[in-house]
Image (spheres, rainbow, N blue to C red):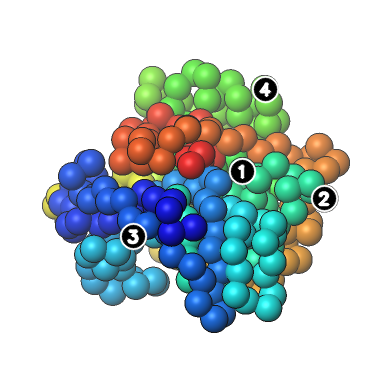
Amino acid sequence: MSTQLNRQFLLAKRPSGMVSRDTFDYVEKPVGEPANGQILVKNLYLSLDPAMRGWMNEGKSYIAPVGLGEVMRALGVGEVVASNHPDYKVGDHVNGALGVQDYFLGEPRGFYKVDPKRAPLPVYLSALGMTGMTAYFALLDVGAPKAGDTVVLSGAAGAVGSIAGQIAKLKGCRVIGIAGGKEKCAYLTDELGFDGAIDYKSEDLCEALKRECPKGVDVYFDNVGGETLDAVLGRLAPKARIVICGAISQYNNKDAVKGPANYLSLLVNRARMEGFVVMDHAANFASAAAEIGGWLAEGKIKSKEHIVEGLETFPETLLKLFKGENFGKLVLKV
């Protein structure tokens, strides 16, 4: 493999505000051979996630930041092309932190095998991957929806929101999605079976929430933060649960993060707001994947992937997340 070149995107600097191409260094290095306990993986698909923006920042978080000069962290699926590890053989397909590069070489820590005959490989980065795990546990464990509850989701046409909303429907809830644009809103109601959709780009959010949630919001699944969070806090039902899964509207702020100005609604409504990190639930991933896989096979939920080709497009493709240009799970085909 030493004659092969490995294209890599390395983190060049800690970005202030929006990420750009010069946030990264692009390099090409020879592909090495696996040492004892290592595998060499040809990366096929990489998951692009809002969390990647947080991984570039220095400071305390739920996971260590990417170091300057290191390959940009990214989850992905690929094929083992050389192995010096007893549990992995050439031809196995794996899911793990492969990085933004053509090849991963190292110990397969936290990796697991996937079966391309069971589902297309990109689905292992969406409904059957960390996206699906996030939707499943954030909604069911933190949101704790009950049949008849009104569940509102921001970023509802995105990777996590679309899966979480469909699970809420399976649990007998009334589901309202907040998304940007007529096409995305129509997808939520016409394709995924949501009970209503709010186009934040063309509607007054507070008025639309009154229309769609006349009895209030029992569960709010927040992927956006900022003004959207404030608006929903103003429509809470008693004993509501708010899941803080993400805050994409705030990730590229140059100033301080905008916190909830309407937080006293939590007091008035005896509501609960709780943060969520998916790795806290790693011990139960297998059982969740089995249930989600069953729903997919039965046609009870749908998984939508937005696939962009070309590793070289990584910086610009990543920006689609923060511009609201992705429709479903954003995946980079290497």
- Disc 4 designates what residue? 190
| Image depth: mark 1 or mark 2 in front | 1
Question: Quick check: marks 3 and 4 in contact, CB under 8 Å?
Answer: no
Judging depth in this view, the residue of 76 and 287 nearest the camera is: 76
Q: How far apart are marks 1 and 2 (CA)?
A: 17 Å
| Image depth: mark 4 or mark 1 in front | 1
N-terminal-most mark, 3 or 4: 3
Judging depth in this view, the residue of 20 and 210 nearest the camera is: 20
Query: In which image quadrant can residue 266 be found?
Result: bottom left
Q: Which residue is drawn at 36% across and 35% down?
A: 313
N-terminal-most mark, 2 or 3: 3
- Disc 1 designates what residue? 122
Question: Quick check: marks 1 and 3 in contact, CB under 8 Å?
Answer: no
- Disc 3 designates what residue? 71
Q: Which residue is drawn at 17% across and 57% down?
A: 13
N-terminal-most mark, 1 or 2: 1
